[in-house]
Amino acid sequence: MTHHLVVEGLCAGYGDLRVLHDVGLSVPAGSVVAIVGANGAGKSTLLSTIAGLIRPSAGRLTFRGSDITRARAEDLPALGLALVPEGGRLFPFMTVEENLQLGAYSRHARAGMAGRIREVTAAFPILTERRTQLAGKLSGGERQMCAIARALMCRPSLLLLDEPSVGLSPLMAETVLQVVAGLARDEGLTVVIVEQRVTEVLEIADEAHILDQGRIVRSGQARQFLADRSIQEAYMGL
Ligand code: ATP
């Protein structure tokens, strides 16, 4: 099996605070991999470290066969790795279209920008309707879709999603997760997704890892986790 992303022995944190301890996982090409765990477990730190925003103190990151452990965050989108941070971080006083244009900041991506905007908004019809609206006026769900669409502008092969359903209604959360599942299924996108909505994310994921105090404590098939009583009790509130 080809692995799109391989994380080995990863240690990272903030100053003297060590958050991630010897984290290892592999992400098969075209799969959706969920990272779940309690608040403060280190899920966002893991995504930020993969995306080059935090420099690991040990370990190795391999993306499509290349060592990216020391790559700079600003160089990764052009290599095909894009992060959608928690809350989306859109520019609220810019329109939806302007936010999407900002996603295509490499010279290569800028060349085909108009066509790419049409392609990415095809997956999110609501964004076509809202094209000229300020991003700050979008609903939570629309904002999340716009953030995902912006990340897709640079034609990534790997999307890192940090809690895309946070603050959304259950119905809107479901819609966003279904869109993510569709991107993997129909476009062959590889996705690593951090989610608090454990049941919902396990339903769209292929594989899952449980992060607990900065360590991976369980890894397996998402559907096995869904049926696992101890995981239901510990992480799914059942
Ligand atoms: P949540 O679901 O609450 O976002 P998480 O699993 O994503 O949690 P992280 O946000 O990665 O967890 O946080 C892990 C630990 O790192 C926590 O103890 C947190 O307080 C700490 N931390 C996170 N960001 C920073 C930062 N910028 N500076 C210092 N410590 C931080």
Image (cartoon, rainbow, N blue to C red):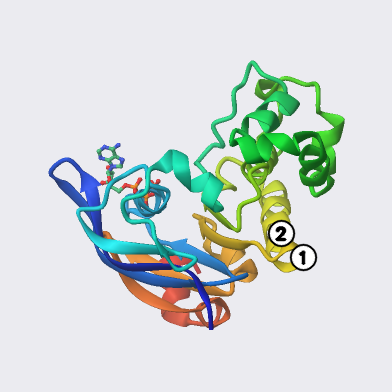
Residue 69 rendering spot, x and y as whole percentages: 32, 56
Image quarter of residue 190: bottom right
The span from disc 2 to disc 1 (Cα, nearest Å) is 5 Å
Are the two marked residues, 2 and 1, in contact with CB atoms closer than 8 angstroms?
Answer: yes
Q: Is residue 80 above or below residue 167?
A: below
Residue under pointer 2: 183
Say few, some or many: other residues with alpha carbon within 10 Å of mark 2 (under 14 / 14 to 19 / 20 or more).
some
Residue under pointer 1: 186
Amino acid type indicated by mark 2: Leu
Secondary structure at numbered mark 2: helix
- Decide if residue 230 is in sight here: yes
Is 95 or 233 nearer to us in this picture? 95
Residue in the picture at 42% in, 70% down: 209
| Residue at the far top in the pictured view | 93
Residue in the picture at 59% in, 36% down: 106
Image quarter where ligand 1 lies: top left
Q: Is residue 13 above or below residue 215?
A: above
The numbered mark at residue 142 is: none
Say few, some or many: other residues with alpha carbon within 10 Å of mark 1 (under 14 / 14 to 19 / 20 or more).
few
